[in-house]
Image (tube, rainbow, N blue to C red):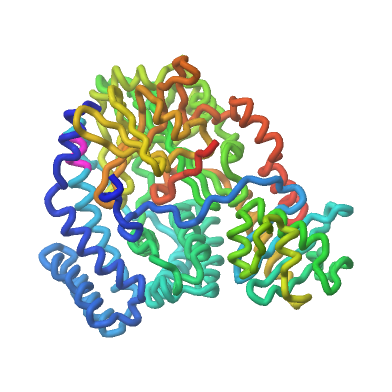
Amino acid sequence: MNADRTAWDRRSVVPVIPPIQRRKLAKVPFVELADGRLQGVVSSGSDIARVYVSSIAAKTHGFNCSTNNNRPCGGLGSRPCKHLVALATEAVLQYGFERVARYLGVEAGDGDSTGGDLIRVLKGGPESIPAATVFSRFLRHLAYLEVPATTEPIADLQWFPATGAVR
Amino acid sequence: MLGIQLSELLGEVPPGVEEALDLVAGLDDALVHGLGRLGEERATAFAALAGAMAGTPLGDRLGEAVEKIANGSVADEYLTALAGGRTALFGAVHDALLDRLDSALGRTRAEWAGLSAPASAPDNLLAGSRSWLRELAITGWRGVDHDLVSASSQTVEALLAEPGLRGLAVLLDGFAAELRASSPIATMDVPPARRWADLWARAVLLSHPEGRTGVQEAAGVTGRLLILGVDVHEHGTAVQVQVHGLLEVSGESRPRLVRTSVAAAKVDTIVGTAVWGLLAGYPVLMGALAERRSLQVADMPLTAGGDLVWQEERARPGEAADPFAVARVQLAGALAPAVPPLDRHPVRIAEPVLVEGFTAFVEQDGSVEFRLNDTSIPVAVDRLPACGPLTPELVAAASAVLGLMRWDAGRWSLQPFAVQTTVKRKPAEAHTGDWAMGPTDPKVVKAEAKAGDAVAVLRERAGRLLRR
Ligand SMILES: [Zn+2]
């Protein structure tokens, strides 16, 4: 029956975005591969009102970390801080090592599989990356949870079946 | 569904379907490369679409649009004509397929009796959407970059705040996320041309000032809702639970097939069983799913398209009702609703059926098919949602399945939403809605506890960071 399985470009319903894995959000509430960066938000361990905005650029591997108020992260030197390690670790949980490594253009070794491994092989250094852009994307992300539910049928969602039953 | 019904359904492709889809392929291909640079070959394929529709009410406008676009004038009115022509072709395909399915199943369908009065919406919001869709069409999927994808964000944000434009907002957001995740599309192996042209054309029509109809034509009904099962739709920022059931309306002798839906906004990290937490505001409906109960509804709006517009305060739980028993006794005689004109597209075909007496075959690649007599139907095990207990293994071991008949790209399939099966040599049942009030499988409960409450964490963050 594989013979009549129609080509991907002739189907209305095909999975375009690979499924992401569920993970604990408390420490790193937001991670994304977007705008040519692995970027996200890491909650401060000491101050619940403070978050760190951390990002790593694809290809150049330049990285940055600062608070949401644009104060530079104290832990950031010529090598990535603990927030960047946390960001990479959670990104690997969410997207899988392969996908993150491919997006960043990292040449990983055979045994590499963790966020720490990714950080170790980054070839860039500290680089200016606009924290405000990333932080505003995080706020926009949070704002979805404030959109009220609706019971008016959304026919458009017929194009987006829920998938992913694997246990 | 019986073997003889299945072989009638799969017997031959309704006339005209393949030709219509071939015509659409020319336009889909043009959108891959961009309407701003149609080569001669693509312009010809593109013109065939207008030629084939020359005799229809859309013919003149479509002919003009194709000519203008080929000459480099890509204006909104031409794009609307193009999207309209493509949508009309899919409408015809939809009708032919649904007719075939109805006649195979012996299902009676109501005539369309709804009004088509356009719903009003702020035109500045629609204009934002139109301008993004125009840029996309000119550029083509291959030319899409980060900036063009990001340009949709503000439009989506504004649309989400407008209740009457929720469908368009959810559509654009899901579409933009796919473009973003596929970047750089210039080097993508094969773009999903049919799918993205579908999403684009639908969005173009919904962005037209008269492209949407409201649900204001809904009439209040009173009666008993017997649930057959639940279909779940989801992308990164939206989830919709769509219940299929039989509605016994007081004073009517024959039950009606209806759908009732609840949709919530979400983020991509809220996945699997966590999505039910977003629907906690609907305990009557979710409770009925989890406990397999019927529901009493009083004066609840029912649209001409068969959508019961759910209102918790107009519903109360009824007695237990086994969906398999309901389907065995009442599904064959139920009256199916008409399909709203704008929704006539094959992806919307989702007809509830009961299938039993089959032999299941599992292929090496994990795909499953059911054989009834000498006919086989593929089972859409890739459409089993992570929020429910159904798995490909349970489906492959099933003796009876309740689900939806689906069609895509020339192929019918069965999407299960409930199974009667065997677990450890004992009869068992599993329904997609079983965990609507939280998972009941100890293994899943444990995994959920370990992952923590994503919704609560993000709400806490939102409370602290959003309004400052
Ligand atoms: Zn840091």
Q: Which residues are magenta?
A: B98-103
Camera sees residue B225: no
Q: Residue at x 19, y 77 (%)?
A: B44
Q: Nearer the viewer, residue A150 or A98?
A: A98
Report the residue at 51% width, 61% height from top. Answer: B177
Residue B20 can be seen in this image: yes
- Quarter of the figure with the N terminus of chain B: top left
B238 shown above or below B140: above
- The quarter of the picture where residue B72 lies is bottom left
For the point 26% across and 62% down, which residue is it?
B86
Q: Which quadrant of the figure has residue B40?
A: bottom left
Left or right: residue A135 compared with residue B142: right
Q: Does B421 sit left or right of A147 as displayed?
A: left
Residue B253 magenta-drawn?
Answer: no
Q: Residue at x 46, y 40 (%)?
A: B232
Q: How many marks?
A: 0
Q: Is residue B464 above or below residue B72?
A: above
Q: Main secondary structure of the magenta part?
A: helix
- Residue B160 coordinates in the image, percent (x, y): 53, 56
On the image, which quarter does residue B334 sit in? Answer: top left
Q: Nearer the viewer, residue B23 or B132?
A: B23
Residue B101 among magenta residues: yes
Q: In the rendered view of the protein, which quadrant contains the C terminus of chain B?
A: bottom right
Q: Position of residue A81 (x, y in %)?
A: 82, 64
